[in-house]
Image: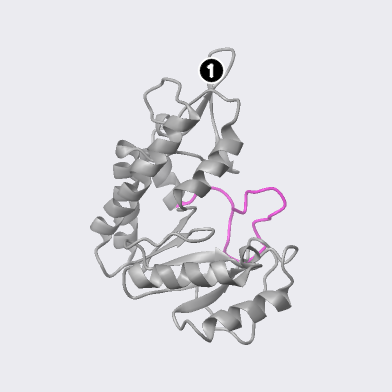
Amino acid sequence: MGDAAGKGCNCCYPSYTCGPGLFQEGIQSMFPVSYAVNVFQKNGSKNTICGYPGLASYVHFQASSDAMAHYLASYILSYGYDGIYLDGYIRDTLWEKMFTQRMAGLTFDSDGDGQPDTIADAINQYSTWAPYFVYRLRSLLGPDKIILANSAGELSSPLINGLTIEMESCVDFKPCYNALVAQEAVGAQPAMSVMWLTHSESMPPEQQCERVAQIQKQLDWVYAGTDFFDRSHIVCNNSRVTDF
């Protein structure tokens, strides 16, 4: 993320450096370009879509899901991590809205066969294979590893331990509270969710801290985490914090 415009490599940690490390190099070596979302150009060439600077976008299908789940699980288990954070595992309707806005008017291949797909094809592909990817990841990691999903709202999956929700999405308190409670009711144990303190231009830091404290008084598995790369770097004195 330090490679993104306006976010320098030294914004957060003295040891943070830009460019690929062992993790990204491993993904690049095992993840074929054909697995990504590739847009057909008028001259016959194809360009890979990046959802974030330096990160190729892809829509889950069976081969890509198997490959990615195996790589991630192997990496986590090899290095002894507590679990994994899935940035952007979201409900079908929200994914559909975001993908439709991004890909409107483009001709693209989303399933690796080299042939054009429609937005409807991609939506069906995500709905079918994204849960499969998380299932494969959980199967390989086992029941003791933590899986969190940056869900941008409700998700309620039995395969994950909890959600992470950015605080600017919680202007209306009730939907955020309901999303957390519903996920805890059906999710893997131990339950754990995180409210990201971020985007202070959308919600003032004081309001974010007050809202988090309000939630934590009722839900003891909810933590707060500051988003260093956003540069808001909000820290609350009245909240339980994570070590992320």
Residue span colored magenta: 1-21
Q: Position of residue 212 (x, y in %)?
A: 59, 78
Which color mode does the image show? one colour
Give the residue drawn at x 74%, y 71%: 204
> Number of labelled discs?
1
Q: Position of residue 203 (x, y in %)?
A: 72, 68
Q: Which residue is label 1 attached to? A: 45
Give the residue drawn at x 64%, y 56%: 9
Q: Which of 10/108 is in front?
A: 108
In the structure shown, which secondary structural element does the residue marked by tag 1 occupy? loop
Is residue 80 found inside the magenta-colored segment of the image? Answer: no
Q: Which of 136/229 is in front?
A: 136
Is residue 16 found inside the magenta-colored segment of the image? Answer: yes
Q: Quadrant of residue 173?
A: bottom right
Q: Position of residue 28 (x, y in %)?
A: 43, 40
User: Is residue 89 left or right of 214 when viewed as pictured?
Assistant: left
Q: Crowding at label 1, few (<14), some or many (≥20) Cα neighbours within 10 Å?
A: few
Q: Quadrant of residue 186?
A: bottom left
The secondary structure that most of the magenta stretch takes on is loop
Q: Which of 134/232 is in front?
A: 134
Give the residue drawn at x 34%, y 50%: 131
Instruction: Inspect this view and state whether residue 107 appears.
Output: yes
Instruction: Inspect this view and state whether residue 71 appears.
Output: no
- The amino acid at mark 1 is Ser
Give the residue drawn at x 27%, y 70%: 144
Q: Is residue 207 above or below residue 159?
A: below
User: Is residue 167 left or right of 206 when viewed as pictured?
Assistant: left
Q: Is residue 207 above or below residue 15?
A: below
Q: Position of residue 121 (x, y in %)?
A: 42, 30
